[in-house]
Amino acid sequence: MSSTTPHLPLTTSKDKPAMPSRAMQTDERVRRISPWRSFIGRPEFGSIAGTVLVFVLFGIFAGDSGMFNLDGVMNWAQVAAYLGIIAVGACLLMIAGEFDLSIGSMIGFAGMMMAVPSMFMGWPMWASVLFAFAGCMGLGWLNGYLVVRTRLPSFIVTLAFMFILRGLTLVLSTYFSNSTIVSGVGDKVGSDPLVSTLFQGSALHGLFAWLAQAGIIAKLPNGDPIVAGIPKVLLWWLLMAAAAGFVLSRTRFGNWIFTVGGDAVAAQNVGVPVRRVKISLFVFTAFCACLFGVLQVADVGSAAADRGLQKEFEAIIAAVIGGALLTGGYGSVVGACFGALIFGVVQIGISYTSFDSDWYRVFLGAMLLLAVLFNHYVRLHATRSK
Amino acid sequence: MRTRWIWTLLAGMLAASAATAATGPHANERYVLISHAADSDVWWNTVKNAIKQAGADFGVQVDYRNPPNGDLADMARLVEQAAARNYDGVAFDIADVDVLAKPAMRVTAKRIPLITINSGTQQQSEQLGAIMHIGQPEYEAGKAAGERAKAAGITSFVCVNHNAANAAAFQRCKGFADAIGVDARSSMIDTGVDPTVVENKVSAYLRNHPRTQAILALGPNSADPSLQALQRMGLAGKIYFVTFDLSSAVIDGIRKGVINFAIDQQPYLQGYMAIAALAIAHEDNTRDPAAIIAKLKANPAFQSRLKEYGLQPVYTNHGVSSGPAFVTRENVDTVAKYAGQYR
């Protein structure tokens, strides 16, 4: 791990004692690094380059198919946004050196925790949503507590929760609704002003209607704009990414995350509250999964036992494409977001080409391999030349 | 090294895209069929083959799309994607009407012809704004099978559910259970799709419940391993065995008398007729199901396909039902030849 720590932002420029600029220039220990070199040395460089590559590829193969029309863009952006939300959580947790494999099951379980009290127990929707968030974060805390307390690999502990939560989701839905799907939640969400404002549908209707009126964006045959607005999940993604990115790169807590993932023992020795950092990141990851679940239930209108299947792997893949190391201590939120974008574009984009969708996984795997090789190559190159 | 990778990928993609080009006067028309099924689901292969043949018969291009993990929320995105791509016609199965209502609106708002297939009801299909529904209502199909079993004196059963998270699968069990008058949930085992696990769960259940009279398998994914479990336990032929859908193992089982009957929804018809009806709707610019079906019936290519594979669509006022049809020892040979491909 120590090999990657030298170029970590362990201390940000803010934390450094103010140094006269003249002294900086004359100090022979400080070497100037060109902005380009420092850019390609950043963890997110690989995923940004990968994103460009993916867009070029789809530009060639699906450029005229409607993929880059406004409704096409909203379509894949939405897929990327859902994944992006959990990728942000998974990324921070990975930087701190832990995994959460229960993300996917947590998504299904969050949806059920939101649907069951409101549909079968007469709770108001806002209370159910609050309950879902509290429940998920509680489970996240339990995950984290078990990991730091027992020092078992988080891989195993959260794998257990992956099964437990998936099973509980199925139990809850068949017990209450006699079916594996709880329907009608969407209408309930729609009638609750607070929850529907926060989680359902899209924003900026007026702007889009105006743009359509002005002829800037396309219209449907009935005169409505082709896209009603910006899906709220996109706004949530931006918010989460901005918040997590800020915390990671600009705050003391962000430095702690890197340190804990780099070397937990050393971090403990210099006084970083390792346990607290890890547990709070498990809670944050669970929060992200719950946000995914709630947004999805509000969007598709039902909660089901198979929601979020294998999303934990997609989130980890996005973080890895984004330059996060599986061993911890290195990575970036921006990178994970670009990783999610690549994933969303590939997943939906392949439908715009004329390839058989049987090739999707091959394509995805190749993309992942390419991204990881590319990251590896870039990192080697960047560190060698230093 | 990196560039060589990219070029290999590009070359592969070019080769793949060249292979799917169609010819003829309608070669620019492009239709899509979207299913909810995960990649590993063998049943949809017949539908895939059917839409390829429909594309060839009508000279149009056809895509098949599905969410790789079978997640319905991902399927909703695919339907929205189909609208964004401006297909000439869209067909999908109503895996869950709530999930698909909004995405379907995107399709119909663009005046793209829409046809629903497979699970779902006529009423749901109308609610989504589809021209017609081509499929088999799951609960009724389960019930019809259950009534057949009841007539044979069956009063207890185990439902082998390989897709427990799917609402339609549960409806099949429930229909069967209601027909013979038992509780569906206590008679159901959730097996997952791994054949070894399915087999062991079935034999464990039968050991614990030796009085079980019948097995209902919800598809080849659960029927094939269940059959193997019965053979290992020496129960094959002694227990009343019913399955949904066909596979070569199921057909073999019917021939040997270890499976009493299979409920066939003739998936080929769902795929072929959906694409054919969309092509007709597009060509004649009509949304009238009766006119579309009349024209389809008169199509010689369609008739020869029906004859070749021994298929019998059931025409109704609203459209057409593809099932339930029962495959028994009497008619199994006509089905056997094309099982897994066109039947």
Image (cartoon, coloured by chain):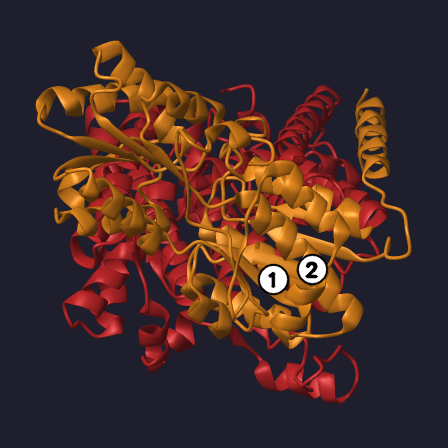
Chain colours: A red, B orange
B42 sits left or right of B21 in the view: left
Q: Where residue A155 sits in the image (x, y, percent)? A: 34, 26
Which residue sits at x=30%, y=45%?
Answer: B145
Residue indicated by mark 2: B296
Q: Quadrant of the C terminus of chain B?
A: top right
B173 sits left or right of A360 in the view: left
Label 1 vs label 2, nearer the camera:
2
Q: Where residue A70 sits in the image (x, y, percent)? A: 71, 68
Which residue sits at x=50%, y=20%?
Answer: A2
Q: What residue type is labelled 1?
A: Glu
Which residue sits at x=31%, y=54%?
Answer: B139
Q: Where residue B29 sits in the image (x, y, percent)? A: 81, 58
Chain holding disc 2: B
Please determine if labels 1 and 2 lie on a single subunit. Answer: yes
Q: Residue furthest front?
A: B330
Residue A169 seen from this side: no
User: Within 10 Å of the Cα at label 2, are there few (<14), some (14-19), or many (20+) other Cα atoms?
Assistant: some
- Relative vertical location of residue B83 with respect to residue B249 in this rendering, above or below: below
- Relative vertical location of residue B65 with respect to residue A239 in this rendering, above or below: above
Q: In which quarter of the image is the N terminus of chain B?
A: top right
Front residue of B87/B309: it is: B309
Q: Which amino acid does label 2 sit on?
A: Leu
Chain holding disc 1: B
User: Within 10 Å of the Cα at label 1, are there few (<14), some (14-19), or many (20+) other Cα atoms?
Assistant: many
Which residue sits at x=13%, y=41%?
Answer: B186
Which mark is drawn over residue B277? none
Determine contact: label 1, label 2, CB under 8 Å: no
Residue indicated by mark 1: B80
> Which secondary structure lies at badge 2?
helix
> Which secondary structure lies at badge 1?
helix
B283 sits left or right of B310 in the view: right
Q: Residue A317 appears in which quarter of the rendering?
A: top right
